[in-house]
């Protein structure tokens, strides 16, 4: 499969040389690291003593041979490449929507083979447990009867879809596409910050970033044995195909809310890469319990829908009746087994920020294994003891509304004013069940080009997990960067950027 | 005894519409003293009907109509046999409250304890509970529910046209007027606040005499509350009676949103007019009744924006009276 969007293989730089034995860079002293701060957080490139970590040696040698002007030029070429390809997203604010390019950073973030092996095992374990959990709460509800998780957390969740009760799901796989948010803590361990089990986005940026970084540092890239990720669309297609009993003439469509959606670029990109239809709700109709797309040559049956629309909006007959984006009757066709929807409906109940706190217990409960990847310590404001702790320590905690995502409805205590904290405290007291809090986690820092040199910026990691007949994780991820110095917020809707992630084969 | 039920729903459009999709929850349930003897649905224009049982055990029929039409008529006909109801105690002992425990409560009950879209707490509900002296249940749960039923009956005037099918309970609470749907939601919300699982029932009432406030030619709605030592028991706050042989149950749910007799969408820029007629007659044996029914009270919905003919419109729904 060709990447039309990224077909330009011309290198950004001038002649690039394979890295030789480099000099020893000193962050905080030498160019381009003169302003590179090493603090409490784990740094991806430098040890606490300021020595370059092994996997970054080649990149460091290359950087030290490039002039500042050359770096600026390469960075600009990166950004232009994004702009030309239309890799944009939309920022919503109170009164306007602005289309922007995702700021991209040309310096890759590197993950070693052994680090990846652990991530892969841990993420697989987690998605298997979360799917067992979903199957359980939509069927016999063993986990509720055994008191492992409070019933009100499930029954009270706005993402719990009663309509899914008792419905069979292919391979028991409710979550077929997952994008978990990981961070690396001060000790250098990866921990899970959030499971995104509904309609996670960002995989197109993972692929676009690869294109950029590979061309910014072609020789370094070639010399390091970076594992390929370009086959992601093919793996996604295989996963979607595995969700239908049919083997021939399987018809798949990507269902998008439309061109005004912040991730429309990605929807179009994935549909093109997989060679399947990109449709909006109005392009589909249900007749006699079967889903069809309107084509110029008549109606064409659809077997699998990769939907990028939230549950609420997918079928105005069964869910939100004011939805203009959905397909009336779609859920009945789904219930009748005539179409598969990926992800299944009702997965949001398991990535609720309150349910998150229980995931380690769920792993032990369903798999009788210890979690390979840890959670971030989480205080549930619904528990009285936690609530008083949270209110007393607002200046040290990050507080999040349970049902929100994308950095909306959250308070970063240490960075907030007293007034903001007081206002938020009132919100928490008014509806404690709706809030969780976590210690401010020092996200790790990674070298990021900032215009006049390379500085440390906080990063997270979003790998993409596919789960159909089997679980597949393409060896790569979206590394999101908080571009503002000191900022911990990496969400693209809040001014974050991204960079390529190199998973090494050995 | 046997009841014959005929329920006609008619949508009329001012201009041709297409791609109608419709779901029906009209089939009387068959459980407990109530047994369904026959059931048919006919649509005009004709459509292929599909059916499933939803997670609450309600029979749901659905169909779609691609081609253009200016009228859609749905006629459901059922015969139900009603066995005598078992004798119910007038009151229970006070220990009944302690029986709401982990041994007796199961998943069906928990869902009916949580607030739902139309049956949820609000400042207006709190104010009503305070004024009507319903803040705390008095006596055993059964006595308390009977007090609650009477309290709603006494505090509200039955009047249609005050609330609409999708009105929140606040409208009826402010006006102290409404129809059975509103009263059922209010009673459900209060029972849940008291810790009693409560659910909404949609169905039909055989009206006899003039004491019933509800409307004989409409669908009816009431409440079921769960008492550990008896089970689900029906309360009809509209008429201040416990539900019994005269109440024919069609669908149960957390509130109206789970049980609408019709719900649907269509495409096309047209006004729509909804008419409903319900006739319920005792009958000696399961026979079919023809033409004993008048189409009552047409309801109109405002013209959808004509400038956007491709938009999707929601079918008007029938308020339960």
Image (cartoon, coloured by chain):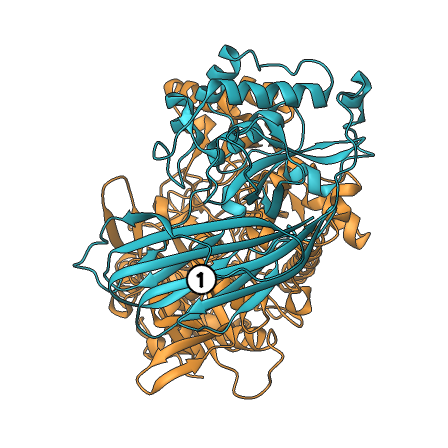
Chain colours: A orange, B cyan
Q: Which type of secondary structure does the marked residue at label 1 adopt?
A: strand
Q: Is residue A57 left or right of residue A257?
A: right
Q: Is residue A25 left or right of residue B272?
A: right
**Residue located farthest toward the front when viewing the structure as drawn:** B284
Q: Is residue A37 above or below residue B9?
A: above
* Disc 1 crowd, CA 10 A, few/some/many (<14, 14-19, 20+): some
Asked if residue A322 is positioned above or below residue B290 in the image, the reply reads above
Q: Is residue B272 above or below residue A431?
A: below
Q: Residue at x 50, y 30 (%)?
A: B210
Looking at the image, which residue is at 29% across and 58% down? A260
Q: Is residue A239 visible?
A: yes
> Quadrant of the image for the C terminus of chain A?
bottom right
Q: Nearer the viewer, residue A445 or A398?
A: A398
Looking at the picture, how far across and down is residue B313, in whole percent? 32, 57
Q: Quadrant of the N terminus of chain A?
A: bottom left
Kindly tell me whether residue A435 is visible in this rendering. no
* Residue toward you, B159 or B207: B207
Q: Nearer the viewer, residue B264 or A98?
A: B264
Q: Position of residue B149 (x, y in %)?
A: 59, 24
The location of residue B112, given as percent across then percent down, is 63, 37
Q: Is B69 drawn above or below residue A457 in the view shown?
A: below
At x 41%, y 51%, the residue is B276
Label 1: chain letter: B
Percent of width and height locating residue A386: 63, 24
Q: How many marks?
A: 1
Q: Look at mark 1 in the image and give the residue it sits on.
A: B74
């Amino acid at each position: 499969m060709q990447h039309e969007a990224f077909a330009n293989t011309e290198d950004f730089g001038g002649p690039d040389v394979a890295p030789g034995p480099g000099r020893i860079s000193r962050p905080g002293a030498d160019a381009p690291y003169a302003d590179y701060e090493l603090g409490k957080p784990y740094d991806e490139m430098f040890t606490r003593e300021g020595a370059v970590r092994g996997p970054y040696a080649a990149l460091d040698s290359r950087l030290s041979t490039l002039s500042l002007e050359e770096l600026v030029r390469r960075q600009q070429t990166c950004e232009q490449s994004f702009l030309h390809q239309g890799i944009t997203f939309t920022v919503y604010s109170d009164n306007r929507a602005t289309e922007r390019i995702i700021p991209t950073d040309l310096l890759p973030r590197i993950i070693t083979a052994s680090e990846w092996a652990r991530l892969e095992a841990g993420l697989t374990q987690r998605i298997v447990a979360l799917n067992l959990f979903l199957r359980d709460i939509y069927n016999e509800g063993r986990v509720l009867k055994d008191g492992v998780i409070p019933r009100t957390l499930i029954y009270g969740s706005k993402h719990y879809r009663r309509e899914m009760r008792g419905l069979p799901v292919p391979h028991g796989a409710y979550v077929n596409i997952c994008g978990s948010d990981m961070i690396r803590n001060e000790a250098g361990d990866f921990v899970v910050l959030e499971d995104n089990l509904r309609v996670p986005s960002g995989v197109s940026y993972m692929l676009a970033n690869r294109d950029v970084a590979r061309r910014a540092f072609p020789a370094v890239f070639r010399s390091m044995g970076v594992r390929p990720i370009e086959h992601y669309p093919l793996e996604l297609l295989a996963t979607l195909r595995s969700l239908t009993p049919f083997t021939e003439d399987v018809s798949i469509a990507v269902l998008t809310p439309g061109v005004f959606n912040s991730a429309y670029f990605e929807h179009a990109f994935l549909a093109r890469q997989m060679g399947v239809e990109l449709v909006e709700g109005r392009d589909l109709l249900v007749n006699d319990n079967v889903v069809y797309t309107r084509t110029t040559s008549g109606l064409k049956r659809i077997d699998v829908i990769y939907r990028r629309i939230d549950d609420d909006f997918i079928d105005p007959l069964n869910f939100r009746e004011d939805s203009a984006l959905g397909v009336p009757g779609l859920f009945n066709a789904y219930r009748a087994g005539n179409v598969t929807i990926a992800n299944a409906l009702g997965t949001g109940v398991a990535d609720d920020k309150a349910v998150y706190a229980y995931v380690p217990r769920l792993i032990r409960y369903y798999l009788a294994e210890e979690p390979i990847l840890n959670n971030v310590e989480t205080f549930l404001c619904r528990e009285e003891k936690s609530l008083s702790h949270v209110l007393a320590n607002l200046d040290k905690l990050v507080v999040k509304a349970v049902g929100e995502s994308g950095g909306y409805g959250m308070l970063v205590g240490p960075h907030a004013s007293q007034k903001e904290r007081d206002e938020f405290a009132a919100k928490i007291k008014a509806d404690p069940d709706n809030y969780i809090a976590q210690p401010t986690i020092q996200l790790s820092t990674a070298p990021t080009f900032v215009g006049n040199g390379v500085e440390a910026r906080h990063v997270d990691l979003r790998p993409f997990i596919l789960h159909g007949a089997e679980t597949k994780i393409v060896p790569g991820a979206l590394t999101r960067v908080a571009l503002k110095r000191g900022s911990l917020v990496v969400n693209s809707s809040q001014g974050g950027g991204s960079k390529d992630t190199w998973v090494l084969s050995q | 005894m046997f009841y014959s039920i005929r329920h006609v729903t008619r949508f009329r459009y001012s201009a041709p519409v297409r791609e109608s999709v419709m779901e029906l929850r009209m089939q009387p349930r068959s459980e407990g003293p109530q047994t369904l003897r026959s059931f048919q649905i006919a649509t005009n224009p004709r459509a292929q009907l599909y059916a499933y049982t939803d997670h609450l055990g309600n029979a749901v029929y659905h169909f779609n109509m691609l081609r253009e039409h200016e009228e859609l008529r749905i006629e459901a006909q059922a015969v139900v046999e009603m066995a005598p109801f078992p004798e119910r105690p007038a009151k229970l002992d006070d220990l009944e409250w302690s029986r709401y425990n982990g041994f007796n409560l199961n998943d069906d009950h928990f869902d009916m304890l949580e607030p739902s879209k139309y049956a949820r707490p609000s400042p207006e509900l709190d104010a009503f509970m305070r004024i009507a002296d319903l803040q705390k249940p008095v006596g055993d749960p059964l006595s308390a529910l009977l007090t609650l039923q009477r309290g709603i009956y006494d505090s509200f005037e039955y009047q249609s046209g005050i609330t609409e099918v999708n009105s929140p309970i606040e409208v009826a609470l402010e006006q102290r007027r409404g129809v059975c749907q509103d009263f059922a939601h209010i009673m459900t919300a209060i029972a849940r606040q008291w810790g009693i699982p409560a659910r909404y029932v949609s169905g039909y009432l055989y009206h006899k005499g003039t004491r019933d406030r509800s409307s004989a030619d409409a669908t009816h709605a009431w409440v079921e509350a769960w008492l550990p030592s008896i089970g689900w028991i029906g309360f009809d706050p509209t008429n201040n009676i416990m539900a019994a042989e005269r109440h024919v149950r069609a669908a149960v749910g957390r509130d109206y949103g789970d049980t609408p007799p019709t719900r649907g969408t269509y495409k096309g820029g047209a006004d729509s007019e909804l008419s409903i007629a319900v006739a319920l007659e005792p009958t000696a044996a399961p026979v079919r009744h023809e033409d004993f029914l008048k189409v009552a009270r047409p309801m109109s919905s405002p013209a959808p924006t004509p400038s956007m003919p491709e938009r999707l419109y929601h079918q008007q729904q029938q308020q339960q009276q």
